[in-house]
Amino acid sequence: MRNPVRTEAEAFGFVLVCVALFTLVAVAGIFFGGWVALGVFVVLAIGVAFYVKGEPKPPAKPVRSRDHDRNQILVVANETVAGRALQREVVNRAGAGADVYVVCPALNSPIRHWASDEDAARAQAEQRLAESLAALAAEGVEAHGEVGDADPIQAMDDALRAFGADEIIISTHPPGRSNWLEKRVIERARERYPLPLTHVVVDLEREHGRSAAPGTASR
């Protein structure tokens, strides 16, 4: 889902658009009656819904760049970013030397997401990211990273504009407990990016020796 208010400028623009839409509905009601106003409202509401649900735009620049000597690996993970299975995969893929860039999308509740209140989500993501980078450093892998957009596809788009990755590693919870798998993030990323993509399943409950609560879906 696209967040229409990711920045203050976008938030201001979104408010102006909402004011304009409601003005159109009011004018239609005054001059043409309630049913026409209702029809205008429904059409505009559908248009806004399609905009918000729309797929983020493709990266502005080609994601593959071979003007570097070392292999460049983009790692995308959320709650599983410090999982041992992911750490092993990154260490193995890095081999003798590679540039590793870790992106940890900021988890957020729908209400806070729409209100652009992402401070707590970013703080938690920053902590998970720091733990992941420290674990990789302990294995001899020098990695950098950032907290990304809550939408993993948008987070990858943003990262690939600045980091010319040669391959992508995406980590998720197991099927049945992964919000990303439910939203087909892996399939969409494979369709979207012309790069080798590795999917790593991290079972944090098994790694930590505990059971997951039934019916919970994580990212």
Image: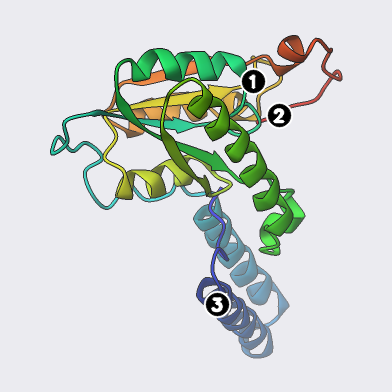
- The residue that appears at 43% across and 23% down in the rendered structure is 140
The answer to whether residue 204 is above or below residue 21 is above
Question: Do callouts 1 and 2 mark residues in contact (Cβ within 8 Å)?
Answer: yes
Question: x and y percent of residue 127 in the render?
Answer: 66, 42
Q: Disc 2 residue type?
A: Ser
Is 14 located above or below residue 103 in the figure?
A: below
Q: Nearer the viewer, residue 83 or 149?
A: 83
Badge 2 marks a residue whose secondary structure is: loop
CA neighbours of label 3 inside 10 A, class few (<14), some (14 to 19), many (20+): few
Residue highlighted by disc 3: 17
Residue at (71% x, 20% y) in the render: 177
Residue tagged 1:
173
- Amino acid carrying mark 3 in the image: Val
Using residue 88 as the reference point, say whether residue 160 is left or right of it. left
Which residue position is annotated with label 2?
A: 218
- Is residue 150 found left or right of 136 in the rendered image? right
**In the rendered view of the protein, which quadrant contains the C terminus?**
top right
Counting from the top left corner in percent of width and height, residue 112 is at: 74, 57
Local crowd size for mark 2, using a 10 Å CA cut-off: few (<14), some (14–19), many (≥20):
some
- Taking depth in this image into account, of 50 and 137 the one nearest to the observer is 137
Q: Which residue is drawn at 73% across and 54% down?
A: 120
Upstream in the sequence, badge 3 or badge 2?
A: 3
* Residue 61 percent coordinates (x, y): 23, 49
The three-letter code of the residue at mark 1 reads His
Q: Which tag is nearer the camera, tag 3 or tag 2? A: 2
The residue at 59%/39% (across/down) is: 130
Q: Indicate which disc, 1 or 2, sits on the residue closer to the N terminus.
A: 1
**Quick check: 202 above or below 77?**
above
